[in-house]
Amino acid sequence: MPLPIAPIAGFVLRNGVVALAAYAATRRYERGFRDQRAEDALDDIPEGVTLRRDASDRGQTNATARFRRILRAGRNGPGVEIDISALGRIRLRRV
């Protein structure tokens, strides 16, 4: 019994477009690198959210945020640690 071509062609076309888009995206963007200084700075952030503004520099505000939790499947089941850290700086200068 011959297979109908229309459903197979639609499947191949849809997956081909996804594969082409993924290939184009990987070729366009530069591969990142890990900066150990930034990793150490993110590890030193306290848990919670902080805002800081120096009295000497009124145009700059620094912010940090960290969220750390352990999620488990059941009471003694396997777990996953979630660690989200962020550093931010907003600088406004009149030009």
Image (tube, helix red, strand yellow):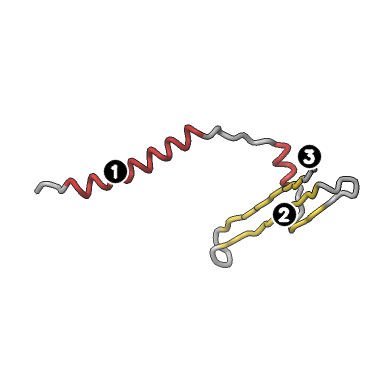
| Residue pointed to by mark 1 | 13
Say left or right for 19 vs 72: left
Could you say where residue 45 lies in the image, as x and y percent from the top left? 75, 50
How far is the residue under mark 1 from the one under mark 2? 44 Å
Asked whether 56 or 14 is in front, the reply is 56
Residue 94 position in % (x across, y down)? 80, 43
Label 2 to label 3, Cα distance in Å? 30 Å
Q: Are marks 3 and 1 in contact (CB under 8 Å)?
A: no
At 68% across and 51% down in the image, what residue appears? 85
The first of marks 2 and 3 along the sequence is: 2
Mark 3 = which residue?
Answer: 95
| Proximity of marks 1 and 2: CB atoms separated by less than 8 Å | no
* Residue type, mark 1 in image: Leu
For label 2, the residue is 65
Q: Is residue 1 left or right of residue 43?
A: left
Q: Which residue is farthest front?
A: 95
Give the structural element (helix, strand or loop) at label 3. loop
